[in-house]
Amino acid sequence: MRDHSHLELSRRDLLVSSAAALAVTGVAAKGAAAQSSGKEVNFNTSVSFKVNGEMRDLEVDNRTTLLDALREHLHLTGTKKGCDHGQCGACTVMVDGRRINSCLTLAVMHEGDEVTTIEGLGQPGDLHPMQAAFVKHDGFQCGYCTPGQICSSVAVLEEIKSNIPSHVTQDISAKVELTAGEVRERMSGNICRCGAYSNILDAISEVGGIKA
């Protein structure tokens, strides 16, 4: 796995962060204006989205992140809060099939979206193939980063299957090959402080059908 300590923000991450900041700033400005005029201020918003196949309706503070909505409101605590700054990947979930850091996005931004957390991938006795592979290859030690690692792993295989290139893709005009190098690059945003990277790669390689 690669060290991301010196990586700059990607353009997409910057846009998402900026959108979230503008949303919060706009709410605060409207609130201040309403308070100055003596009007009652409502900082909550109703939001509906599908989580692990079930529609969920919430009323949340406009500043609530998707991570906190999942953990604190829906009690889906499998998704972990690590750095809370989008740097460790422990909070990774899938939204409409694409992986995101749930600590970097507001819950109110996901009206109508479909969210999949680690609980939605599989349960004891009925594990997702990736979960089973992580167990088989000891792809975890303390286990704190594991839900995010597994959600990212599932999404990574789908990215490659959908022919989405990465920074190490040699020819972006050709079909993206499922290689250990591609997996390492794409998983580099998920940090494992225990250092189980080789075992994680083995697990993904087995599910993806590649030789590490």
Image (tube, rainbow, N blue to C red):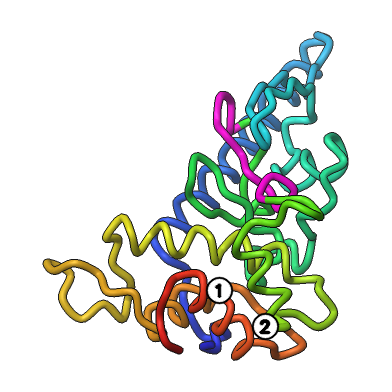
Question: Residue 37: x, y in percent?
Answer: 77, 11
The magenta stretch is 109-121
Spatial separation of the CA atoms under disc 2 and disc 1: 21 Å
- Residue 137 numbered tag: 2
Identify the secondary structure beneath mark 2.
loop
- Residue 134 numbered tag: none
- In what quadrant of the picture does the C terminus appear? bottom left
Q: Nearer the viewer, residue 185 or 119?
A: 119
Residue drawn at (38%, 59%) of the image: 159
- Queried whether the magenta region covers residue 126, the answer comes back as no
Crowd rating for badge 2 (residues with CA inside 10 Å; few <14, some 14–19, many 20+): some
- Circle 1 is placed at which residue position? 189
Identify the secondary structure beneath mark 1.
loop
Residue drawn at (50%, 49%) of the image: 16
Question: Residue 147: x, y in percent?
Answer: 72, 62
- In what quadrant of the picture does the N terminus appear? bottom right
Total numbered labels placed on residues in the image: 2
Crowd rating for badge 1 (residues with CA inside 10 Å; few <14, some 14–19, many 20+): many
Quick one: which residue is furthest to the left in this view?
A: 173
Q: Nearer the viewer, residue 83 or 78?
A: 78
